[in-house]
Image (tube, rainbow, N blue to C red):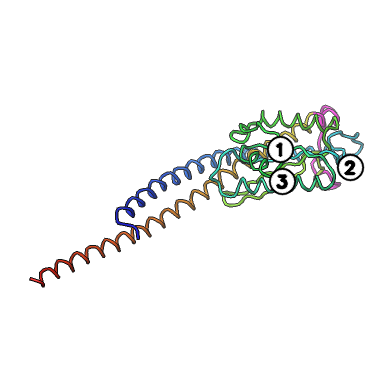
Amino acid sequence: MASLKEIKERIASVRSTRKITSAMKMVAAAKLHRTQRAIGALVPYADELQAITSHLVGGEGVPPIALATQREAVGRATVIAFASNGTLCGAYNGNVVRKAAGVVGEWQQQGAEVEVVAVGEQLAKGLHRLGITPEEGHEEFADRPTYEMAQRLARRMMTAYAEGHTDRVDVVYYKFISAGTQRLVCEQLLPIEIGPAAEEGARTTEYILEPDRKELIASIVPRQITLKIYAAALSASASEHAARMMAMQAATDNADTLIADLALEYNKQRQQAITTELLDIMGGQNGR
């Protein structure tokens, strides 16, 4: 049984740890709030651009578009996965590692060569442990995603697809829905998919195109692909902060419970020690 001194020291240690977890929760909440604002500003623009892109690409008489052309067979595939550089965010990184490794395994079973782009230091480490060697060096993109970083990566992927160096590009990331809900998804980036808005009768808006459709497609499609990567990076970042906030909240709650249990044990032992001393004193008086 631990002594009173040991219990008291442990209570002090747990209280110190609780201050750290509580502070980390507040920091994660502040970062989450900032990233949520960025996502909220991006979503309306992204939705409208997606609708316009689908309308342009899916219209009648549109010439074949290289980035929308489905390959008969996928000989080379690229998987872009988003996780984090830091830890203490629950199962966030581990889930992304397993999902990315699963997607890689599926393509390999189909006989495709797979290149993995790992955004996040913890993701790269996790894939290395599974025997997968990813392309690294995207740590800054995981910490502070910007449109310029997304644009550079999008240009690389578009060039690789257009030149035949890859036949498919998938993106693995946590889609942020709310602070308490995030969904791990794998979405197709290239070739671009024509959504429901391109189907006949699905959109009633009439567009006046200036310049012509071909020039607009050449301008808008790369923006749409860049925007998808940027949105995935922001969503992954927000999901990371939400996961860390929840993990630190759970750690703080556990610390509170442990402190209460230790305080109860301390008081019990202290009461027992006092009772023993009183009995000793009373026994000594009776013996006189």
Point out the tag, 3 or 2, that comes first from the N-terminus. 2
Q: Position of residue 156 (x, y in %)?
A: 76, 29
Residue type beneath disc 1: Thr
Q: For this view, does 4 lie left or right of residue 168?
A: left
Residue plotted at (90% across, 35% down): 64
Residue at disc 3, secondary structure: helix
Q: Which residue was labeled with disc 3?
A: 101
The CA span between labels 1 and 3 is 11 Å
Residue 65 inside the magenta-drawn segment: no
The CA span between labels 3 and 2 is 21 Å
Point out the tag, 1 or 2, that comes first from the N-terminus. 2
Q: Residues within 10 Å of mark 3 (few under 14, many from 20)?
A: some
Residue type beneath disc 3: Ala
Which numbered disc covers residue 133?
Answer: 1
Q: Position of residue 49 (x, y in %)?
A: 74, 37
Q: Range of the magenta residues?
A: 197-218
- Do the residues under discs 3 and 2 have CB atoms within 8 angstroms? no
